[in-house]
């Protein structure tokens, strides 16, 4: 039995159900690892068992119990890791990420008799529709206070992308049509106001009425006004992939193809050392890019999300492109001794910022999971095992919740566990992905079709 015959994401297998394919994969993994690799399948299964246990007993209960705002709705994200923290505002990105994660874990079969994760997603979705959605110009505001009064009414594409992403997942979990309709409406609004018809891609920063903010000195919080960024285009691609997978809307599919092409051409080309974080509107390098350092976390996050986009588009998967980014990270950014992935470094040279940030470890874990599911490369397997060990014993506190940032050897540097940029999306997504890959029978939940209504009813 050859693992390589069926690539990464259990995609388009006409003769096998997804469950039976996972069983075939796991048997092949056991036999092949036993023959060829120093790390056994039992070790990967053991890590998956530990991850599932900590998800069920610590991580998901933590977010359910501590982050929900039981007075006003939505989520409160303020935990300094020392028992303190007082939220002062609500941020579109983290609010939407919380909706996505609670929807995702419910969809993947995580249940708790004392905690209803779908209900946790539902109340967050309702808060967002009541307080973040702009009833006049459409789209979603950037920030509110704790009660839901708008404090920043700008439209930032990065946040709009996460709104699409979260609403699609909530639709999948709940079966409700409203969130999917809202996601499609937002996509069409973005196309009208943010798409660049001359150069391709999307503008990223707008006033409330969708007037573009182009002054590079404007304080826009995410990237640089008047420029296009790898970060935003990556997450827009991520959102369009899920919206396209559910709706099969022709316009969404065309936009997904455009987002994929732009990411592959301008931001994450085949040579990882040439990845570029910011470009001008006409795709010339943006300010400071001549001496900018690479973000290993964004590079490997792109690598595995690229495969998802290609799958939705029905294309052959770009494994050479994927491998080039993981190989580059292994060579320059990975900690081969302790595990994990460093934060930043030059194009072709060792990392010189060796902090380990929570979301970088999560995306490294996710990308390596995809890599090992495809082929039994000993370097990938060793890196995956060491990273699993690192996040369990050093990135996470004793309660299982990951610190924002630790030093190379795992000493807490930024002890915060929740804040407006740290919700439960990166790490929970990676842990669920790992468990589903290496623990047979995981990820089973009552199956729903992707779209529960004829597409015509959404138009």
Image: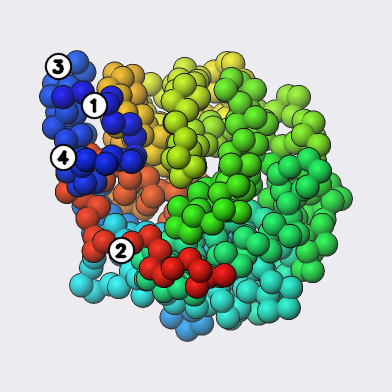
Report crowding for label 4: few under 14, some 14 to 19, many 20 or more residues within 10 A (C-alpha): some
Mark 4 and mark 1: Cα distance apart in space? 11 Å
Quadrant holding the N terminus: top left
Mark 3 and mark 2: Cα distance apart in space? 38 Å
Q: Is residue 427 left or right of residue 43?
A: right
* Whether residue 305 is visible: no
Foreground of the two, 422 or 313:
313
Mark 1 and mark 3: Cα distance apart in space? 13 Å
Look at mark 1 in the image and give the residue it sits on. 3
Report crowding for label 1: few under 14, some 14 to 19, many 20 or more residues within 10 A (C-alpha): many
Look at mark 2 in the image and give the residue it sits on. 448
Eye-nearest disc, 1 or 3: 1
Mark 4 and mark 1 lie on one chain; the one further toward the N terminus is 1
Q: Which mark is residue 174?
A: none
Look at mark 4 in the image and give the residue it sits on. 23
SS for callout 1: helix
Residue at image point 56% right, 76% down: 129
């Amino acid at each position: 039995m050859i693992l390589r015959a069926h690539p990464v994401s259990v995609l388009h297998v006409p003769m096998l159900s997804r469950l039976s394919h996972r069983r075939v994969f796991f048997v092949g993994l056991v036999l092949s690892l036993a023959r060829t690799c120093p790390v056994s399948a039992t070790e990967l299964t053991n890590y998956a068992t530990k991850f599932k246990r900590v998800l069920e007993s610590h991580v998901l209960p933590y977010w359910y119990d501590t982050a929900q705002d039981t007075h006003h709705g939505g989520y409160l994200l303020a935990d300094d890791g020392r028992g303190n923290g007082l939220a002062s505002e609500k941020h579109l990105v983290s609010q939407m990420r919380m909706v996505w994660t609670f929807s995702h874990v419910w969809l993947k079969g995580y249940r708790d008799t004392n905690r209803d994760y779908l209900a946790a997603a539902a109340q967050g979705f309702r808060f967002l529709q009541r307080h973040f959605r702009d009833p006049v110009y459409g789209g979603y505001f950037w920030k509110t206070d704790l009660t839901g009064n708008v404090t920043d009414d700008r439209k930032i594409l990065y946040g709009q992308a996460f709104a699409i992403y979260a609403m699609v997942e909530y639709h999948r979990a709940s079966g409700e049509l409203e969130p999917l309709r809202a996601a499609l409406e937002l996509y069409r609004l973005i196309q009208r106001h943010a798409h660049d018809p001359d150069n391709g891609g999307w503008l990223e920063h707008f006033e409330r009425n969708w007037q573009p903010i182009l002054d590079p000195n404007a304080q826009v919080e995410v990237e640089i006004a008047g420029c296009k960024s790898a970060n935003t285009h990556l997450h827009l691609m991520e959102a369009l992939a899920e919206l396209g997978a559910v709706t099969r809307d022709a316009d969404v599919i065309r936009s997904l193809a455009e987002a994929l092409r732009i990411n592959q051409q301008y931001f994450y080309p085949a040579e990882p050392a040439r990845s570029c974080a910011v470009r001008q509107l006409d795709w010339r390098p943006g300010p400071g890019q001549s001496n900018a350092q690479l973000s290993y976390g964004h590079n490997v996050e792109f690598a595995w999300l690229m495969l998802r986009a290609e799958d939705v588009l029905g294309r052959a998967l770009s494994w050479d492109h994927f491998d080039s980014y993981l190989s580059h990270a292994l060579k320059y950014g990975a900690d081969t001794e302790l595990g994990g992935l460093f934060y930043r470094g030059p194009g072709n040279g060792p990392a010189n910022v060796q902090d380990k940030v929570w979301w970088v470890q999560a995306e490294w874990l996710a990308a390596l999971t995809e890599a090992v599911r495809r082929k039994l490369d000993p370097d990938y397997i060793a890196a995956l095992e060491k990273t699993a060990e690192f996040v369990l014993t050093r990135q996470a506190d004793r309660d299982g919740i990951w610190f924002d940032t630790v030093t190379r050897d795992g000493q807490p540097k930024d002890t915060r566990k929740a804040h407006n940029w740290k919700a439960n999306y990166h790490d929970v997504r990676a842990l669920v992905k790992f468990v589903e890959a290496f623990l047979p029978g995981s990820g089973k939940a009552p199956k729903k079709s992707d779209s529960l209504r004829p597409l015509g009813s959404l138009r």
